[in-house]
Amino acid sequence: MSINLLQRLITSFILLFLFLFINFSHQYVFILSILILSFIICIEANKMISKILSVKSFKKFNIKFLILNVLTFFYVFFIFCFFSYVIHSSESEVFFFYIVSICFFTDIGGYVFGKILGGKKLSKISPNKTISGTIGSFISSIIPLIFFLNFDFLNLELNMNNILFCLLISLISQLGDLFISFIKRKAKIKDTGNLLPGHGGVLDRVDGIIFAVPFSYFLLELI
């Protein structure tokens, strides 16, 4: 086992237990954690924007730099944070865990199927992603639905609406991943940061989640 893979596994277990503690702890702990997470995301996004626009100092005013940072701040704090809180408080912490699980299995499915089957690349934006991996992501996104059927209070059934819900959340999660990969490519960097050993930055791990969570709220209103 390589050192990088070992770091990745250890970090993944720590992140899993940390998320479970935050998600099922007191609501104030959840809110504070989401705000801290959002702050870190904005810092990492700011660094990418700086690299793309070649902004090395705040002394020289750059309108594009300002607009992109304001838009990032608005989306992360007023859309992602807000709808995370709404889903966690109104739907239940278990349902929030369910949404994040769909994104997690989407990511895992893409990685496993892509590594095992390989095949044609999906896009030049992210060279490591394959069509087989994308199909694997959609298939794996159904796993949380099957698992959470045991939680009666969620009122989940194995029907087309719930399967479609998983597939659409998976789609948005994958598109979010590709979007951040596109930004990283523009910034000419591999990772958004180095805070998480074996994974890179925080944004590298939650790139799909920050788009899937708000989308899930609107999807709930439609399905």
Image (cartoon, rainbow, N blue to C red):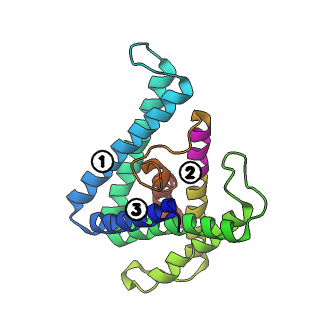
Residue at the top extreme, as displayed: 60
Residue at the right extreme, as displayed: 120
Q: Amino acid at mark 1?
A: Ile
Q: Tell me, for residue 85, which label it has, or none.
A: none
Rounded to the nearest angstrom, the CA distance separating label 3 from label 1 is: 18 Å
CA neighbours of label 1 inside 10 A, class few (<14), some (14 to 19), many (20+): few
> Does the segment drawn in magenta span residue 175?
no
Quadrant of the drawing holding the C terminus = bottom right
Q: Quadrant of residue 164?
A: bottom right
Q: Amino acid at mark 2?
A: Gly
Q: Which residues are magenta?
A: 177-185
Q: Amino acid at mark 3?
A: Thr
Where is mark 1, residue-wise? Answer: 36
Task: Examine the rendered structure and indicate whether residue 222 appears above or below residue 46.
Answer: below
Where is mark 3, residue-wise? Answer: 11
Where is mark 2, residue-wise? Answer: 176
- Confirm whether residue 29 shows in the render: yes
